[in-house]
Image: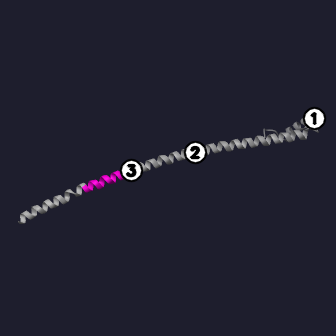
């Protein structure tokens, strides 16, 4: 951690022991430990908040894509329904002249026989 090896750490502890004194060194170490624990907790909370925001943003993008796909699918269904309606109306319109033509043909045949 921070590129400090065992010999450097021993030197730092000896200097701290000389400067601070043996009575206050445990209290200082305890305070330092609590401070580092709080810092780690705050860092973890910050990371979780960032991750949650990221997930929320991704979910919003996904929902927007789904809404767009749904809209396209609905438009496609409407277009297909209109095409089917046009085919049905076209078939009905085309079917009506056929019976009229058949009736005319039948009338012509009846006149020939008569």
The front one of 41 and 82 is: 82
Residue 6, position in %: x, y?
Answer: 85, 41
Q: Is 85 covered by the magenta stretch?
A: yes
| Quadrant where the C terminus is found in the figure | bottom left
Q: Residue at the spot x=23%, y=55% of the render? A: 94
Q: Earlier in the sequence, mark 1 or mark 2?
A: 1
Residue 110, position in %: x, y?
Answer: 9, 64
Checking the image for residue 107, the label placed there is none
| Quadrant where the N terminus is found in the figure | top right
Q: Earlier in the sequence, mark 2 or mark 3?
A: 2
Q: CA distance from mark 1 to mark 2?
A: 55 Å
Residue 48 falls in image quadrant: top right
Per the picture, the main secondary structure of the magenta-coloured stretch is helix
Residue that carries the numbered disc 2 in the rendered image = 58
- Residue that protrudes farthest toward the top in the picture: 19
- Front disc: 1 or 2: 2
Residue that carries the numbered disc 3 in the rendered image = 78
Residue that carries the numbered disc 1 in the rendered image = 18
Contact? badges 1 and 2 (CB < 8 Å)? no
Considering the numbered disc 1 on the image, is that residue within a helix, a strand or a loop? helix
Considering the numbered disc 2 on the image, is that residue within a helix, a strand or a loop? helix
Q: Residues within 10 Å of mark 2 (few under 14, many from 20)?
A: few
Q: Which residues are magenta?
A: 77-92
Contact? badges 2 and 3 (CB < 8 Å)? no
């Amino acid at each position: 951690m921070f590129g400090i090896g065992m010999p450097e750490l021993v030197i730092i502890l000896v200097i701290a022991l000389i400067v601070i004194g043996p009575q206050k060194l445990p209290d200082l170490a305890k305070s330092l430990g609590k401070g580092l624990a709080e810092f780690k907790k705050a860092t973890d909370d910050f990371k979780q908040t960032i991750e949650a925001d990221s997930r929320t943003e991704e979910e919003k993008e996904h929902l927007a894509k789904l809404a767009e796909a749904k809209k396209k699918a609905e438009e496609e269904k409407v277009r297909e329904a209109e095409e089917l309606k046009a085919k049905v109306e076209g078939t009905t319109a085309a079917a009506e002249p056929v019976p009229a033509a058949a009736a005319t043909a039948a009338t012509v045949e009846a006149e020939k026989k008569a």
